[in-house]
Image: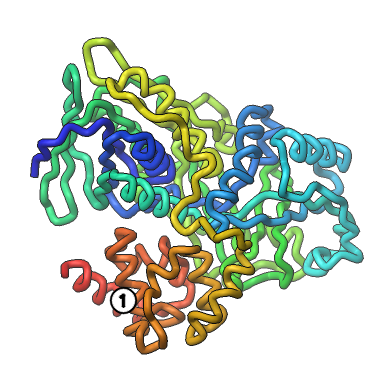
Amino acid sequence: MTADILYDLVVVGGGVNGCGVARDAAGRGASVVLFEQGDLAGATSSASTKLIHGGLRYLEQYEFRLVRESLREREVLWAMAPHLIQPLRFVLPHHQGLRPRWMLRLGLFLYDHLGGRKRLPATRGLDLRRDPAGAPLDPRFTYAFEYSDCWVDDARLVVLNALDAAERGATIHTRARVTAVERRADHWRVTATTAADKTITVRARSLVNAAGPWVERLVGLSGLTAPAGVRLVRGSHIVTPKLFDHDRAYIFQNRDGRIIFAIPYQDDFTLIGTTDADHHGDPRDVAATDEEVAYLCAAASEYFKAPVQTADVVWRYAGVRPLLDDGASDAQEATRDYVLSLDAPKNAAPGLSVFGGKITTYRRLSEAVLRELAPHMGVDLGPAWTRSAPLPGGDLAGQDLDAFVAALAAPYPFLAPRTRKRMAKAYGARITNLLAEAASLEDMGRHFGADLYEREVRYLIAVEWARTAQDILWRRSKLGLRLDPDQAAALDLFMRTASNL
């Protein structure tokens, strides 16, 4: 299939950066087409630690610009998507023999004041002998600092950026792998092959390479210039049954200089991560190794009273961060800041490649991409707009999330409180689009396990590009933690049939 339309912008990559750029550009009046070779957020953007944070440890690496920008974005993103993003308090125990208490206090003072914090509470000290946060910890930890950051459903953040882009006119092609890129004087010609082995060819005045771990591949296909190579750094995580009953997270210092988080996760679990290791080979082959799982268990066991055993792990996952290779000797020291490489000669269509970046700064990155590219696109773009525009479902009519969840009991009394809460956090105000006139569980259709019903599955197929059970169980939700293999297989069979209707 060859499109006759000439788009203003083609974006390659359906992660948080690509979808963020597509949303921003579409909202400024540009015609946009996006290609993603797999599912939205199918790689790095669904394999994060799920945090909207400044990056406390980056202060030690003097990444002050990155930390300041990230801190400023926390409350902006929280306001944009209060259903997906919630504030979270972090407990940092003081470990004798590691960073001294004065250093932690100074770092957290900077953390509190660099980013214009307004709604998030400030740092405070904790006596772990009296505070409930000390109960699950080894008694030798007697003092801690508690500070603020935010938690996010990373994969849903990506999907909602894509959905908003589509509602503003962008064309989103998932499961369409770019196979050829031809640069001409006034446009790009981009060809992709779909999972059904069909060919899509489009023309566009400009191109953004936001292919994440595959950014170098697209540089090779397109002939774009790049400042350096990409360094793939693997981050692995584990999930265990919950290790503590309160709603705060922990940040633990390790003797090797790294830090790990232990975060309340999906009500009944604890998420522990991450590692930093160079990844070699195909990014599609990334997986948490047994050595990394053992490392995370040992690092957490240094702090918790009850050791964390590898047998406790119910899920492991890993992703690769596509960082600019800045020559750092250790993977953990490689910069997490983003680098934009603009290639806009006078006699050829402009293109821009994205290296690095964090979920926290994706919106600012998107603005920066368009600021760099706009003078060369040959079209007039509107002003920046995303700072104050909610993502789909983010307008809760002045209610906080708890009040919004409570208000759902009246129109949907047939849903269990846990189900209402999960759906509210996933869809926000769009929950009414999903549930529509449903008045009973029978109206929800086939039950696939846990609290997943046919009505939600069909909505995700029709609206959110879901095509397989993996898309729903591990990206649109985390119900994969609750469905058994037979239930997941039944869901997958249903979806493959329903997707073709």
Q: Determine the residue positioned at 47% across, 27% down.
A: 339
Q: Nearer the viewer, residue 321 or 20?
A: 20
Residue that extends furthest to the front in the rendered view of this protein? 397
Above-or-below relation of 436 to 154: below
- Residue 359 placement, left or right of 190: right
Q: Determine the residue positioned at 54% across, 75% down.
A: 408
Measuring from the top left, give residue 90's x and y in whole percent: 73, 54
Above-or-below relation of 1 to 483: above
Measuring from the top left, give residue 125's x and y in whole percent: 87, 51
Measuring from the top left, give residue 148's x and y in whole percent: 72, 50
Q: Secondary structure at mark 1?
A: helix
Image quarter in which the N terminus is found: top left
Pointer 1 residue: 491
Q: Nearer the viewer, residue 169 or 351?
A: 169
Q: Amino acid at mark 1?
A: Leu
- Residue 147 placement, left or right of 234: right
